[in-house]
Image (cartoon, rainbow, N blue to C red):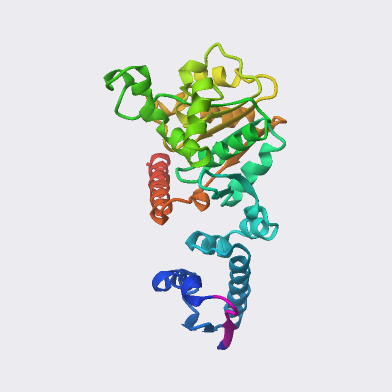
């Protein structure tokens, strides 16, 4: 049995360990064989030598992370114990880089490894496909990149689009004119823009066409030049719609497609153009395909558990089908 003591120097243990020791309990959950006792700024650990050594190394890395970024949450702790890429990105300072400053002056940064990959791949690719579960920040990070590109005059306009497909409803049954029918589908895009562009400035840009938000069907016949174009919910675009969208790319344009292939609302899963695009466009120079996963989820901690449960259910059903 080995015992060590770690001291938190110049760190408020109440903040570091979280409300009601929630963060300390999270750390304990990863080391059930180690007894961890916290008293003020002193952490006493008892257990087998190998596990104690690993724990001490990771715990000290978390301390350094906290000193550098002045923040710590459960997802940071998870990634420090399980994700070497996250550690590398943190040590390289990539989580510190600001994409754009929001309307309240709050900096918008990449918060996960694959969000960092998205920001970096934007520099060398004109088309990015970001696929993964809900809550991973695919669209939000993409819009932050678009706003930055517009402010730095890399592009002349932002075009945000989604296929008008939802489970259980059709546009014709919704009340109002065309705009009122479409707004519920496009609201998440408005929400992200309002986080990053002052209200009056956004209203002006929407009126003069600097920022355009429209359903995917409205893209037909257009050539989008000097534009940053984001297709959200791309899993609900059909094969023909996605081919139409991709061929709208004009000179000096950047395209990003985001989607979740586990949430396809089309009549048949095989109708999804995103599945085909991921399959046939990989390996083409200038195109980056990034696969987000549950480690990138930045919403409520339950979202990660929900995604994991659905993935397990889908996996179990596939096993039953393959082994009747």
> Can the viewer see residue 273 in this picture?
no
Residue 75 image position (x, y, % from top left): 50, 59
Measured as percent of width and height from the top left, residue 140 is found at 52, 41
State yes or no: residue 37 in magenta: no
Magenta part of the protein: which range? 3-11
Task: Look at the image and tell me in which quarter the N terminus lies.
Answer: bottom right
Q: In which quarter of the image is the C terminus?
A: top left
Residue drawn at x 52%, y 64% is 72
Residue 6 lies in the magenta-colored region: yes
The answer to which of 317 and 257 lies nearer the viewer is 257
From the viewer's perspective, tell me whether residue 90 is left or right of residue 106.
right
**Picture quadrant where residue 191 is located:** top left
Q: Position of residue 192 (x, y in %)?
A: 48, 38
The relative height of residue 191 versus residue 156 in the rendered view (above or below) is below
Which residue sits furthest top?
A: 221
199 versus 92 height, above or below: above
Residue in front for this viewpoint, 248 or 93: 93
Q: Is residue 10 above or below residue 192?
A: below
Q: Is residue 289 left or right of residue 295?
A: right
**Does residue 163 appear in this view?**
yes
Q: In the image, what residue occupies the spot 66% across and 55% down?
A: 89
Q: How many marks on residues?
A: 0
Q: Looking at the picture, does residue 306 appear above or below residue 272? A: below
Q: In this view, does 43 lie to the left or right of 184?
A: right
| Horizontal and vertical percent position of residue 172 | 30, 17
Asked if residue 19 lies left or right of residue 31, the reply is left
Which residue is the extreme one toward the front?
200
């Amino acid at each position: 049995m080995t015992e060590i003591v770690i001291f938190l120097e110049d760190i408020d243990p109440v903040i570091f360990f979280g409300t009601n020791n929630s963060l300390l309990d999270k750390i304990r959950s990863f080391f059930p064989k180690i007894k961890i006792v916290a008293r003020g700024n002193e952490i006493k650990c008892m257990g087998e030598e190998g596990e104690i050594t690993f724990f001490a190394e990771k715990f000290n890395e978390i301390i350094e992370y906290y000193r550098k970024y002045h923040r710590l949450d459960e997802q940071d702790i998870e990634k420090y114990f399980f994700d070497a890429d996250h550690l590398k990105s943190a040590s390289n300072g990539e989580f510190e880089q600001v994409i754009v400053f929001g309307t309240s002056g709050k900096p918008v940064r990449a918060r996960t490894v694959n969000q960092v990959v998205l920001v970096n791949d934007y520099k060398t690719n004109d088309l990015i496909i970001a696929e993964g579960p809900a809550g991973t920040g695919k669209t939000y990070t993409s819009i932050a990149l678009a706003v930055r590109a517009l402010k730095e005059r890399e592009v002349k306009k932002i075009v945000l689009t989604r296929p008008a497909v939802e489970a259980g409803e059709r546009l014709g049954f919704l009340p109002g004119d065309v705009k009122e029918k479409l707004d519920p589908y496009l609201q998440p895009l408005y929400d992200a823009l309002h986080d990053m562009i002052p209200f009056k400035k956004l209203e002006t840009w929407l009126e003069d066409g600097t920022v355009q938000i429209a359903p995917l069907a409205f893209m037909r016949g257009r050539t989008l030049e000097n534009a940053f174009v984001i297709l959200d919910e791309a899993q609900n675009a059909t094969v023909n719609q996605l081919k139409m969208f991709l061929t709208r790319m004009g000179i000096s344009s950047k395209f990003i497609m985001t989607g979740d292939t586990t949430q396809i609302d089309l009549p048949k899963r095989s109708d999804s153009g995103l599945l085909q695009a991921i399959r046939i466009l990989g390996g083409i120079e200038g195109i980056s395909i990034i696969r987000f996963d549950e480690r990138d989820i930045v919403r409520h901690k339950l979202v990660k558990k929900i995604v994991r449960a659905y993935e397990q259910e889908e996996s179990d059903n596939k096993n039953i089908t393959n082994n009747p």
